[in-house]
Amino acid sequence: MNRRNFHHVNRALLEKDLDEIHNATKQRIDIEDYHHLRKLELWWRLCSLADYASAWITPNPLSAYLISQGNFSRWTVLTHPVSHKGYDKIPGIPTSYHSRYFARGWRRFVKWPDWITPAGITVTRNHLPKYPSAVFEKQASV
């Protein structure tokens, strides 16, 4: 969707609808979601393990796929919802799945073996100023 298609949308109503969906979703998060997260975490760990086990075979598109799947899943399934406080209010889960404690200390290399820290992601996503896309379009055309 581009700006020409979006001008007729009632943005206030869209924002209200999205807020209602967001709040309803937050109300439904429970321990079952945490158990589902743990299953998916096991899958990306298995993908990463299979990648490392098969990386020595060359050429190896399977290994490339598995490392891609492991990295992508680690970000989209685990780090993204945790960093957005998706699991913070679920009672009885380990604090290592709370946004404040996720991938801190030695657990950082177990949960998030990547070059950017989850704390860095939190700062860039939640604390740095955000600009409307028109600002970037204007800067790109200069």
Image: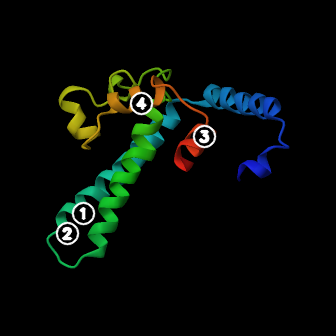
Per the model, the C-alpha gap separating discs 2 and 4 is 35 Å
Per the model, the C-alpha gap separating discs 3 and 2 is 42 Å
**Mark 3: few/some/many CA within 10 Å (<14, 14-19, 20+):** few
Q: Is residue 87 visible?
A: no
Earlier residue among tags 2 and 4: 2
Residue type marked 2: Ser
| Nearer to the camera, 18 or 37 | 18
- The answer to the question of whether label 3 and label 4 lie on touching residues, with beta carbons closer than 8 A, is no
- The answer to the question of whether label 2 and label 1 lie on touching residues, with beta carbons closer than 8 A, is yes
Give the residue pinned by disc 4.
Answer: 124
**Mark 4: few/some/many CA within 10 Å (<14, 14-19, 20+):** few
Earlier residue among tags 3 and 4: 4
Residue 54's disc is 2
Give the residue pinned by disc 3.
Answer: 133
Residue at 21%, 38% in the rendered image:
109
- The answer to the question of whether label 3 and label 1 lie on touching residues, with beta carbons closer than 8 A, is no
Between label 4 and label 1, give the one nearer the viewer.
4
